[in-house]
Image (tube, helix red, strand yellow):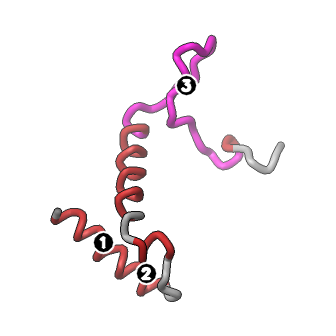
Amino acid sequence: MPVFCPERWGAEAVIPSNQSRKVAIPHDADLYRQRGRIERCFNRLKHFRRFATRYERRTIHFRGFALLATATIWMA
């Protein structure tokens, strides 16, 4: 098996296949929706330069800023 093998990790398809594909790959629509929400959250967090470049060297400081940034987004 190749190194990058999602079946080996127990991963499943979340992104729907193209409509023009002859054999459609089944996917979970709810997981796809949740994945989109998480991606949009990370894209908003990347607007904070400090978060995107990870200036903090310690995990506890990075986590603290991540919580501050999410609170700022939530309040806006």
Nearest to N terminus: mark 2 or mark 3: 3
Give the side of residue 29 with respect to residue 26, left or right.
left
Indicate the amino acid at tag 3.
Answer: Ser
Residue that appears at 42% across and 45% down: 35
Asked where in the image residue 65 lies, by quadrant, the reply is bottom left
Verify whether residue 11 appears in magenta: yes
Indicate the amino acid at tag 2.
Answer: Phe
Q: Position of residue 20 (x, y in %)?
A: 57, 13
Q: Circle 3 is placed at which residue position? A: 17
Verify whether residue 72 appears in magenta: no
Q: With respect to residue 46, does 68 lie above or below?
A: below
Q: Circle 1 is placed at which residue position? A: 69
**Alpha-carbon span between mark 2 and mark 3:** 36 Å
The magenta region covers 8-31
Give the side of residue 24 with respect to residue 43, left or right.
right
| Mark number, residue 62 | 2
Asked where in the image residue 18 lies, by quadrant, the reply is top right
Q: Nearer the viewer, residue 48 or 6?
A: 48
